[in-house]
Image (tube, rainbow, N blue to C red):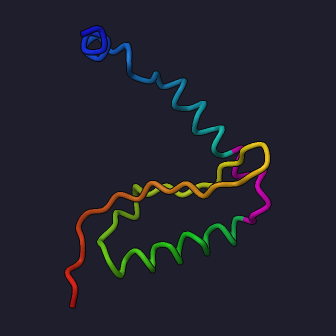
């Protein structure tokens, strides 16, 4: 019940400052990774090429980034799918 009230009054929503901070952290993590922007662009294009074989994706709203932890790097992708392609 309390969760419903928090959502209704906006207590569960992120503020713009929080969202901006999270985006800046992603940019900083990306800069600290040992992948050049050219390589990152190539990775994105190859991911797009493979996914496009199976689904129609929204390229303008997609986000692909590297996130680092204390000793590892993860590729994180948010790729909106418009529709699936039918098998030929």
Counting from the top left corner in percent of width and height, residue 60 is at 40, 60
Counting from the top left corner in percent of width and height, residue 42 is at 61, 75
Name the outermost residue toward the bottom. Answer: 88
Residue at 60% x, 30% y is 21
The quadrant holding residue 85 is bottom left
Does the segment drawn in magenta span residue 72?
no
Residue at 45% x, 79% y is 49
Residue at 50% x, 73% y is 47
- Quadrant where the N terminus sits is top left
Q: Is residue 1 left or right of residue 61?
A: left
Counting from the top left corner in percent of width and height, residue 13 is at 39, 22
The correct choice, above or below, for 24 with respect to 35 in the image is: above
- Quadrant where the C terminus sits is bottom left
Which range of residues does the magenta coloring cover? Answer: 28-36
The correct choice, above or below, for 24 with respect to 31 in the image is: above
Does the segment drawn in magenta span residue 35?
yes
């Amino acid at each position: 019940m309390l969760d419903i009230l928090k959502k209704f009054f906006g207590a569960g929503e992120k503020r713009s400052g929080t969202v901006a901070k999270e985006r800046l952290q992603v940019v900083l993590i990306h800069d600290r990774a040992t992948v050049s922007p050219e390589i990152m662009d190539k990775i994105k294009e190859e991911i797009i090429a493979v996914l496009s074989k199976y689904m129609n994706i929204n390229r303008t709203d997609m986000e692909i980034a590297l996130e680092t932890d204390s000793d590892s790097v993860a590729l994180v992708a948010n790729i909106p799918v418009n529709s699936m392609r039918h098998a030929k």
